[in-house]
Structures are given as C-alpha cells and as structure tokens.
Image (cartoon, rainbow, N blue to C red):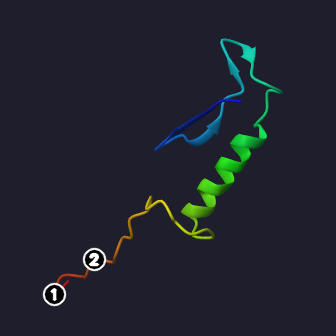
Amino acid sequence: EVFFTGTAAEVTPIRSVDRIQIGSGRRGPITARIQRRFFDILDGSAKDEFGWLTPVVPVPEPVGA
C-alpha cells in the first residue's frame, strides 16, 4: 500500500508504479483510515489533537468602506 501526502495531494492512494499494480490497484485499508481521519480533522468532525489547523479570524472592515 502506497500513498502521497502533501498540501495539494492531501492523502492520495497510488494505484501503480511504472505500470506495476500496487496491491489490488485500489485504495487499501490503511490509506482509507488515514484519509478518513485527515478529512475528519479538516472538516471539524474530529478534534485537531496535532495542531494542524490555524484558525482564521475575520478581518475587520476598514472604517468608511
């Protein structure tokens, strides 16, 4: 089982390398579990116990805008 991680990739399963299929050629159970946890933290349905997220507070409108 192999997957990419990164800002744009997030958690993306790799199905093959040099046209050689990895496992069943589908997302495996470990990747599925990591992916699910990652997205649960991002959407707020799981606690961010790792400090991955930085809250963004609204920027006040300038006076007279």
Crowd band around label 1 with a 10 angstrom C-alpha radius: few (<14), some (14–19), many (20+): few
Image: 21 above or below 6: above
Instruction: Where is residue 31? Give x, y as percent.
Output: 69, 41
Residue located farthest toward the front when viewing the structure as drawn: 49
Choose between 4 and 63: the one closer to the eye. 4
Q: Quadrant of the N terminus?
A: top right
> Which quadrant is home to the C terminus?
bottom left
**Distance between the alpha carbons at the discs numbered 1 and 2:** 12 Å
Residue 12 place in picture, x, y as percent: 62, 38
The residue indicated by pointer 2 is 59
Q: Residue furthest right?
A: 24
- Against 46, residue 35 (above or below) is above
Q: Horizontal and vertical percent for residue 16? A: 70, 21
Q: Amino acid at mark 2?
A: Val
Q: State the residue at coordinates (43%, 62%).
A: 51
Query: Which residue is more in the foreground, 64 or 15?
Result: 15
Q: Name the residue located 79 percent from the left edge and 33 percent from the top edge.
A: 26
Mark 1 residue type = Val
Q: Quadrant of residue 24?
A: top right
On the image, numbered disc 1 is attached to which residue? 63
* SS for dot 2: loop
Residue placed most toward the observer, 1 or 57: 1
